[in-house]
Image (spheres, rainbow, N blue to C red):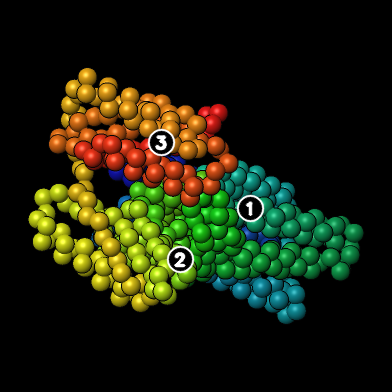
Amino acid sequence: MAQSLNDSVPSREKQSVALSSIVAAAILTALKIVVGALTGSLAILSEAAHSGLDLVAATVTYVSVRVADKPADSAHPFGHGKVEHLSAFVETALLLATCAWIILEAMRRLFFSEVHVEPSVWAFGVMFVSITIDTLRSRALFRVARKYNSQALEADALHFSTDVYSSSVVILGLVLLYISQQKKIPLLRSADPVAALVVAGITVYISLRLGKRTVDALVDAAPQGMTDRIASAIGRVPGVLHHERIRARQSGQNLFVDLRLTLESNISLEHAQSVVGQVESRVREVFPNADVVIHAAPTEPASSDIVQRIRSIAHRNNFLIHDVTAFEVNGRVNVSLDLELEPSLRLEAAHGEATRLEEEIQRQLPKVGEVNVHIEPLLKRVETANEAQRERSNMERQLLEIARRTPQVLDVHSVEAHQVGDNVWVSLHCTLEPELPLAQVHEITENLEFSFRKVFPQIFKVRIHAEPRGQ
């Protein structure tokens, strides 16, 4: 039986580190409350409140991680990843509320009522223990958060890394307070509430940064720089002319990417699918967890490119055509093309399809006058070729002689003739000068095919493979 997502290795690792964070937060909260109450230190009590909220945040993180890893369902087609961002948002709100209380209490102690603080060994001890535990805990959370791209765990780790700095500030405040008591320096008596204000300031700064990230994720803002990285990856794929739209949204550890691309006109569906597949692979090289949806559209051929526009019209109407030629006569363009249709169609139906194509071309291209459509059967299966050795060899020898007498043909080889049903199929390789333009190569092969049919009218198909000299 397949293992459910919540029982997978990534889920277990994320839940384990989140659960250990709850235990650590509970221990530190209890220690800080006891020592803060015994010493009367607002800085330590503020740290206790901070750790208490860390405990709540760690619990929220643990629950959100469990929920976020549930698979997508009919009610949540994009999964449950947004729960992680909601968790981070709740943590941010709790931290800001704590900061407000710390700032108010610090101001009260600075300006309205003095509270005696005893910087004992226990006070220093609990803060050093807090720094040690928070350092280990934040590193573990960061490691798993980066491994699985979990914003909830990253938010938890960010909280605990700020605890390290704030605890260090508290220790500094206790040291200054101890010096004040030993050296009788009145100015340092306010070190404890000042330290608490510094703790609050650090927490507010980190919370606002975290809050912006979580709000961005909740409102589907694209992560910074992500669009440029996707555009760069797309630009390296051959066949993509340009991208019209790039949309990206983060949901937990998953990234959803929606692309609209413009591809070359008149390419086959298989070619377009290959280009789309390459684009998807390139995006996943940059963002392995990306869920990529791509809409590919052909570019519109230039108005001056009549042949390409005719191909586009045929393809859009589901016609298979080849050998399209166009030439201008008295200001009008005449078109000739081959149309492949089902072999089982009767002439009347096939002629109707050809007429429909002609009318569609003339409707969309008013400058086109005559459209001459040559109808061919669409071959779908492998035909059986029968060989009459003597007749075949005789035909091949004559074809070889004809080809060698053709101007600009340097060499001919691999001449084969096969009887396929009632027809004769001929194939051969001919060697030409490598500098010849393609249009001239086509003209030479057309002349060669005409010469073959003139001698052997029974020839149905001629396949000529032109290759440059030296290959």
Specify the quadrant of the image occupied by residue 416: top left
Q: CA distance from mark 2 to mark 1?
A: 64 Å
Q: CA distance from mark 3 to mark 1?
A: 70 Å
The mark found on residue 161 in the picture is 1
How many neighbours does mark 2 have within 10 angstroms: few (below 14), some (14-19), or many (20 or more)?
Answer: few
Q: CA distance from mark 2 to mark 3?
A: 27 Å
Looking at the image, tell me whether mark 3 or mark 1 is earlier in sequence order: 1
Question: Compared to 378, does 427 lie above or below?
Answer: above
Q: Position of residue 107 (x, y in %)?
A: 71, 76
Tag 2: residue type?
Asp
How many neighbours does mark 1 have within 10 angstroms: few (below 14), some (14-19), or many (20 or more)?
Answer: many
Determine the residue located farthest toward the bottom in the rendered image. 112
- Please give the residue where the numbered disc 2 appears in the rendered image: 305
Residue 450 in the figure: left or right of residue 250? left
- Please give the residue where the numbered disc 3 appears in the rendered image: 465
Residue at the image point whose x is 29% and y is 34% from the top: 426
Tag 3: residue type?
His
Residue 71 in the figure: left or right of residue 349? right
Q: Nearer the viewer, mark 3 or mark 1?
A: 3
Tag 1: residue type?
Ser
Specify the quadrant of the image occupied by residue 352: bottom left
Q: Nearer the viewer, mark 2 or mark 1?
A: 2
Residue at the image point whose x is 20% and y is 67% from the top: 355
Q: Nearer the viewer, mark 2 or mark 3?
A: 3
Residue 360 in the figure: left or right of residue 235? left
Front residue (pair 195, 339): 339
Residue at the image point whose x is 69% and y is 68% from the top: 201
Q: Position of residue 322 (x, y in %)?
A: 33, 53
